[in-house]
Image (cartoon, rainbow, N blue to C red):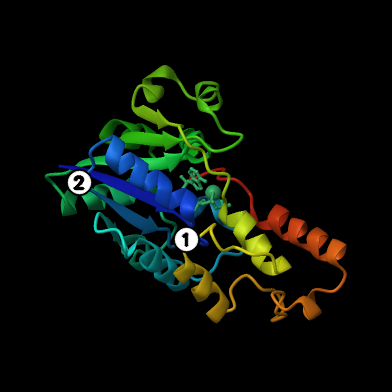
Amino acid sequence: MRLGIMGGTFDPIHYGHLFVAEESRVRFQLSSVMFIPNGLPPHKQGCEVTPPEDRYAMTEIATASNPYFECSRIELVRSGPSYTIDTLEWLERERPDADLVMITGIDAIAEILTWRRHQEVIQRTTFIAATRPGFDIQYLKDRLPTDYLSRIATIGSTSLGISSTDIRARVQAGSPIRYLTPDGVAEYIKEHRLYLSDGLDMSDPSDVGDPPSAIAASHAVAAGRGQKERTEL
Ligand code: ATP
Ligand code: MG
């Protein structure tokens, strides 16, 4: 059996993640896809990240309707930064019969040379990398050696320009996020007042103030929190 692994910060999970997982499952005949939210993302240290339990809850809500999707708390219960190699070793013990296939976006896998023990990661598993706007196959070819590229299959038929950074900025600016993420996730964000700063409810237009300044504020948030995956070290 072939098991897909979809790791991420999922802050919050959105249709970009879900579509890539489903496309990979069907295209590569994966028996299921396991979503693994990071506990402490190594590449996002120093950035403000939503508590793991909230990110896990949203991941469960988003994946519940797909019988081929499952979620794991492994990176939440492990202390310290969530390194891919540790998760891989756990999966090899936990699912000894499975061929493990890691599913990522091209932006994430393009940084693999900065991941802890990346030579072992690339030798012990294969990857499916999905294009995102601004991150195409050439972006990968420019950054990785051919022996790494030979372990990475790419999918790019439908690239969705959805990111968690944009969703967080939209919530803060009071802009809609419906149809970017499942309704249950949008409801969870609202109910738990995630992504609002200083307790100010930006979804209430009377709180937003002058629209141009609200837009500028949301861009500032996006710039501050949306640092790309840089290093796993
Ligand atoms: P952020 O903006 O906070 O970095 P994100 O939208 O990139 O969030 P992550 O949780 O960082 O989401 O991503 C988890 C994995 O999903 C990564 O491998 C990332 O490349 C991939 N991914 C995220 N969004 C998309 C998308 N729209 N299309 C393809 N892959 C995606
Ligand atoms: Mg990201």
Image quadrant assignment for residue 167: bottom right
N-terminal of the pair, mark 2 or mark 1, is 2
Mark 2 Cβ inside 8 Å of ligand 1:
no
Q: Dot 1 lies on which element? A: loop
Q: CA distance from mark 2 to mark 1?
A: 28 Å
Residue 207 in percent (x, y) is at 79, 79
Residue 49 in percent (x, y) is at 56, 64
Residue 143 in percent (x, y) is at 53, 25
Graded by Cα atoms within 10 Å as few (under 14), some (14 to 19) or many (20 or more), the crowding at tag 1 reads: many
Say which of 141 and 13 sits in front. 13
Residue 10 in percent (x, y) is at 48, 58
> Which residue: 45% across, 20% down?
145
Say which of 61 and 51 sits in front. 61
Is any part of residue 223 visible from this angle? yes
**Residue type at numbered disc 2:** Ser
Please tell me whether residue 19 is drawn above or below residue 121 in the rendered image: below
- In the rendered image, the residue lying farthest to the top is 146
Is any part of residue 192 visible from this angle? no
Residue 3 is labelled as none
**Residue type at numbered disc 1:** Leu
Q: Dot 2 lies on which element? A: loop
**Residue ID for mark 2:** 31
Task: Check contact, mark 2 vs mark 1: CB within 8 A.
Answer: no
Please tell me whether residue 98 is drawn above or below residue 208 in the rendered image: above
Q: Is residue 63 left or right of residue 47?
A: left
> Which residue: 32% across, 50% down?
86
Graded by Cα atoms within 10 Å as few (under 14), some (14 to 19) or many (20 or more), the crowding at tag 2 reads: some
> Which residue: 52% across, 69% down?
186
Please tell me whether residue 143 is drawn above or below residue 27 in the rendered image: above
The quadrant of the image that shows the N terminus is top left
**Residue ID for mark 1:** 40
